[in-house]
Image (cartoon, grey):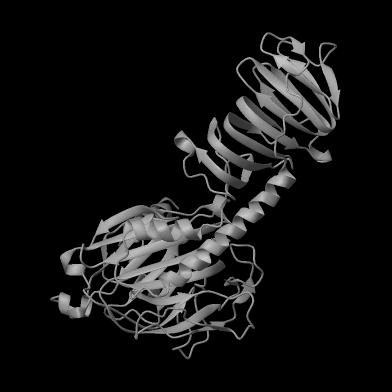
Amino acid sequence: MMLMAGTLLAIAACLFVLVPLIPGINAQQDVVAWDPSAATNSQRVSRPQIEPSASGFAILSGQSEAVWEGATVGIDSGGLLPEGELHLKSGLVHLELFSGVQVVVEGEAVFSIDSPMQISMTRGRARAQVPNAAHGFRIKTAAGEVVDLGTEFAIDVTDDRSSVQVVDGEVELRPQGTGTGTDSLRLFEGESMDLMSDGQVSQTQTADLNLVGPVAFQRELAQSQLNRLQRWQAANERMRTDPRLIAHYQVDPNADWSRQLVNLAAGRDDVASDGAVVAAERAVDRWGRNGGALDFSRTGSRVRLDVPGTHRGLTLFCWVKINSLDRWYNSLFLTDGHEDREPHWQIMDDGRMFFSVKVPTTNSSKPQKVAHKIYYSEPIWNTSLSGRWIMLATVYDVDSQHVSHYVNGTEISSEAIPAESLAETIEIGAASICNWSQPMYRTDATFVVRNLNGVMDEFAMFSGALSQQEIKEIYKVGDPY
């Protein structure tokens, strides 16, 4: 028995040593001599399944001209608000706590979301709408607490006082230094009161706090979004005459559905073909329009197209809403094969963007084993982004010999292209958006799943490299928030 145990340990040790030698296991390697998009199940080792998690107590459901300070720069609508102190320098934001409480905060405001049932506010103005399921919600200030008893109320917090006004229902005021006993008092609809920093209570100095509530805020936000949509449509008309644009696909929510995407690029002769939609279904786009996007979550979903010509460099961008990254490779744009000078653009299951161009055989002294480089970003997606619209872009710049990845108009990585890995021209041919060619060229009907589990409402391709500023402007004008 001891001999058998020793033998098993020896075998296990050998397997442990051999695992790193399996092609594709080391995802951090810079140069590989194989195409990971052609990997089979036997070439990957299963990763341990960890239940997805996220952090936060509330969603930022909308913002109007909001300016955040410090670590909160870049908070996006639809995202989880981070823990800790938040500083809204100006503008309006709409918060949805997981308890169901809706709060509109007006800057300048300093506050933290302590739990789904509590906000602490150092200064600022807010209006809270509390459903029955969240009775007991409170806002804490230096002058005391406001506890909901089934209401909508407004609060204005300064250094020396907290002014409270009940819009509807009832609240309990607990001045600083008191508990839930006789020192607390109740306010009813239309009543207002000041909690003073010294623990005293007085009639409010403000007849009406006049704060925007959640309903009015959403109405204003909808009008603001309509204005942004119109500006984006005008910018699209200008972009389509750009001589570098070779493909621009959108779904017209007002047009008859023919399962064909018209290529809207008009600036040159060698533009891509119209796209043939396979399996994907129409969905709500980032502007809230029914039928303005394509849902690729159904297995086999894709848009088929053909891109002629050769191109000195490449820029790709798209707006996507990802449900999950539950495939090893989640396609954004893949050529049918991976021949010389052909690009692949996708997202790994760990959230990294992936871009590669097959190095021409003429670049190598060993054509049968041509090394090509994969350009990864840092992880750009996790479960907290599920269901949120984001703009992704990648630039293959031949002149500067760099590959850059962008998220929401911001460059998140830039990597030099080694001389031996440079493809001075790119060729595409037949390709798929949000999927790849399998099993089209095979007699075996079984294929690995690589379609994007999510929704896309815009895809564009440029011949050549767009600048950082151009990517930023495309995002800025296309941001629905």
Q: Residue at x 36, y 56 (%)?
A: 377
Instruction: Using the image as rendered, state which of residue 119 and residue 37 is in the foreground.
Output: 119
Q: Residue at x 67, y 17 (%)?
A: 161
Q: Count the numbered circles shown.
A: 0
Point out residue 305 in the picture as x, y percentages from the top left corner: 45, 83
**Is 78 placed left or right of 399 in the picture?**
right
Q: Is residue 78 visible?
A: yes
**Is 371 placed left or right of 475 in the picture?**
left
Query: Quadrant location of residue 280?
Result: bottom right
In the image, farthest residue toward the bottom: 443
In the image, farthest residue toward the left: 365
Point out residue 180 in the picture as x, y percentages from the top left corner: 81, 16
Query: Quadrant location of residue 288?
Result: bottom right
**Is 246 placed left or right of 418 in the picture?**
right
Q: Residue at x 64, y 83 (%)?
A: 256
Instruction: Using the image as rendered, state which of residue 17 and residue 242 is in the foreground.
Output: 242
**Is 474 placed left or right of 158 in the picture?**
left
